[in-house]
Structures are given as C-alpha cells and as structure tokens.
Amino acid sequence: MARILIIGAGGVGSVVAHKCAQAARETGVFEHITLASRTLARCTDIARSVKARMGVDIATAQVDADNVPDLCTLIRAVQPDLVCNVALPYQDLHIMDACLECRVHYVDTANYEPLDTARFEYKWQWAYADRFREAGLTALLGSGFDPGVTNVFAAWALKHELDEVHVLDIIDCNAGDHGKPFATNFNPEINIREVTAPGRYWEHGEWVETDPLSWSMTYAFPDGIGPRKCYLMYHEELESLVNNLKGLRRARFWMTFSDTYLNHLKVLGNVGMTRIDPVRFQGRDIVPIQFLSALLPDPASLGPLTRGKTCIGDLLRGLKDGREKNVYIYNVCDHQAAYAEVGSQAISYTTGVPAMIGSKLIAQGLWRRPGVWNMEQFDPDPFMADLNVYGLPWQCVEVK
C-alpha cells in the first residue's frame, strides 16, 4: 500500500485521481491519495467527482509547482511514497528537485521544456540519473500515452512479436469532434508549441529535420475511423526509443489534424499569436501564445461536447525467425465512454490512465529501480496487462 501525491488538476490530473481511486478501491494499492494544484477549487471539484463516481475520499491541497520550498512543505505534510506530476512540463525539474530533497519516487507524463524554447529534449531530466540512483529513488519519465504507452508497445513487440525492430511509425489519430471553431484537446500553450515546431525523424543513425507539418500521409485507421491525413512531427518518445530499441533504422511520429484546425493555426501564426517570446503591450510584457491560451476553450470543458474516437498505436517492421514481419499495436478510445466514466474526454483519459498505471507499478515494486528511466526500459508485460484492466484495451495485428 502506498501514499500518492498527484500534482496538477487539469483534465489529465482529474483522470489520474479517478483511476487511482479505482485502483485503491479494487486492489488497495493506494492507501491515501492527495490531489494538489495552484487552484484549490479545481482540486475540490475533482475530489467531489471522485467520491461520487468511485466512492473514495481523496485529500486536496494547494501548491505552487514552480516553488521548490513550497513543494517540499507539501510533500513533508502529505508524506507520499511517490509523486505523480501532471502539471506543466516547465515544472518538471522543480518537482524532481523536491522529490530528491524529500526522498520520494517520481512519475511524469511529458518531458521538461524550457519556457523560452519549444522543443522536446530529455537531456535535462536524464542528467538527474545519478542523483536518483544514489538516493535509491525511481524517476519514471513519460508515463502517458505518447510518450508512454507507445514506448511500452514497442518494448512488448520486441519481446513477443519481433526479434528485431527496424522501422517504427507511431501514429496518433484523434477522430473526435467537439463542435468548436478552434480548440485544443489539452493545454493550448503546450499543444500549439508542439504542433508549430519543426518535424524531426530518425533514419540511418541520424536525425533529419523537416519544416513544420510539411510531410503527410493518409492512413486507414481501424474500428470504423477510416482514412485520415497524418502529419509528420517530432515527439519526445523518439529520442529515448532510438537509444533503447537496438537495430532501429527509422523512427517517425505522425498525428492527424483537421483542415479547420490547421487553417486557424496558420492564420494565428501569421499574425504572431503563436509566438513564445514576450511582446511589449501597454507598458507590460505579454507572451502572445499565453494570451491566446487564455482566450481558447478550457480543454476540460470539451468533455461533454466531444464525439468520436482516438486511435493511437505503433506500426513496426522487423524480423521474426529470419523473415520480415509487420505488426500494428493500437488502442481505440471512445470520447463519450471516457466522459461517462470519469468526466473527461479521451485525450485526457488516454494520458491519465497510463500515469496511474506507471505510479501503480512503482508502488507495487514491479517497476521500482533507482535512477531515471523511460518506459521501454522496464518489463512491458505488467503494464500491458493493466491497460486491459483499467480502460485502454489494446490489439496487436499482423499487417502487410
């Protein structure tokens, strides 16, 4: 039994709280759950929903995740065994520092990003490896869906379906419709920074960069979703997977976007609203993308509006017993089903469930190893089993 502190009360934090409560109710793995964020009222609302839906009481607290002393004060008061960080990526290092000082395990869903540069890079967090190892603590990075489940899919395929993996394409499709002219399914600032960054993929031992959203393909998704246009992007799991999947010759990440979304994004970019550098306005500095984020719909408000499904998976080509074999491992998640269960749409659900599972496996000791680790560096089997138990069932099929 473990005590867990969840930091972040957005859509993902809400899902993590609900699913931790489910695991506590069904297995007793979490004996005490605390949800904390800068805005206490959000935590209180989520706690009410958790009690109504899961019948479990969780504690709430207020914390400034940019302030290490404030984080340490909370951690010492709560005395958790592990911290699940679903706050903003800018806050990862502060929370890791607090975990080291207070000697608790650490889990997150997205790699650290500096405020002034929009790029995925693990170097800042990997640099903590010796400190976590010497403290006897586990830091699990990227325990969301992508990154997260997609990493574990690849590790599972290499363990069970392929002797070698040569080509990996991670393909993320959100076929949901919320009816808004323009909205993002998770934090607008993080989403837009991600989408407007240059594309990048791995081929023949080196990184190749492309202009943002300049490469596309059409992929036919299962479960009635059908053909969708996908755009090549760079995503953080590629950085760790090319290090840990030996023999990998090419690795790419693709995501679907509607024409409406891309047209709005292009106009906003043309007028400077997606800039991440400060602009002087009426005697003060403002960051255009942060101002835009304040104007856009709160992603948490999209839950009751969104219809359709997500489909996220790995397409892998490699060798099995000396012959070429291609497998596709994927999950399909229904927006309405996710909302009915926990009050959040599928984007939050597919990130929050794996965050709970990663935390659960550390709490149980199955994935507890001193140091800083990415998801594919642990045994994939218990994680894959829990995906089926906690709402993200997966399929693996052989494809041409």
Image: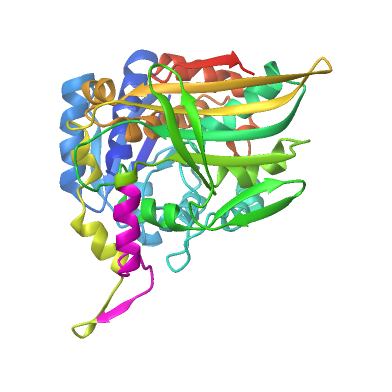
Q: Residue furthest bottom?
A: 283
x then y, percent, for residue 282 = 18, 83
x then y, percent, for residue 220 = 48, 25
The answer to which quarter of the image holds residue 73 is: bottom left
Q: Residue at x 74, y 37 (%)?
A: 248
Q: Is residue 61 left or right of residue 262?
A: left
Quick one: 27 or 238, which is closer to the camera? Answer: 238
Q: Residue at x 72, y 19 (%)?
A: 325
Q: Residue at x 47, y 39 (%)?
A: 230
Quick one: 184 or 294, which is closer to the camera? Answer: 184
| Residue 373 among magenta residues | no
Q: Is residue 335 left or right of residue 252?
A: left
x then y, percent, for residue 187 = 32, 49
Q: Is residue 114 above or below residue 75?
A: below
Magenta stretch: give its range. 261-280
Residue 138, can we see it? no
Q: Residue at x 30, y 57 (%)?
A: 64
Q: Is residue 154 left or right of residue 186?
A: right
Quick one: 194 or 221, which is closer to the camera? Answer: 221
Q: Quadrant of the C terminus?
A: top right
Q: How many marks?
A: 0
| Residue 278 among magenta residues | yes
Quick one: 235 or 11, which is closer to the camera? Answer: 235
Q: Is residue 278 above or below residue 10?
A: below
The answer to which quarter of the image holds residue 258 is: top left
x then y, percent, for residue 285 = 28, 79
Q: Residue furthest right?
A: 322
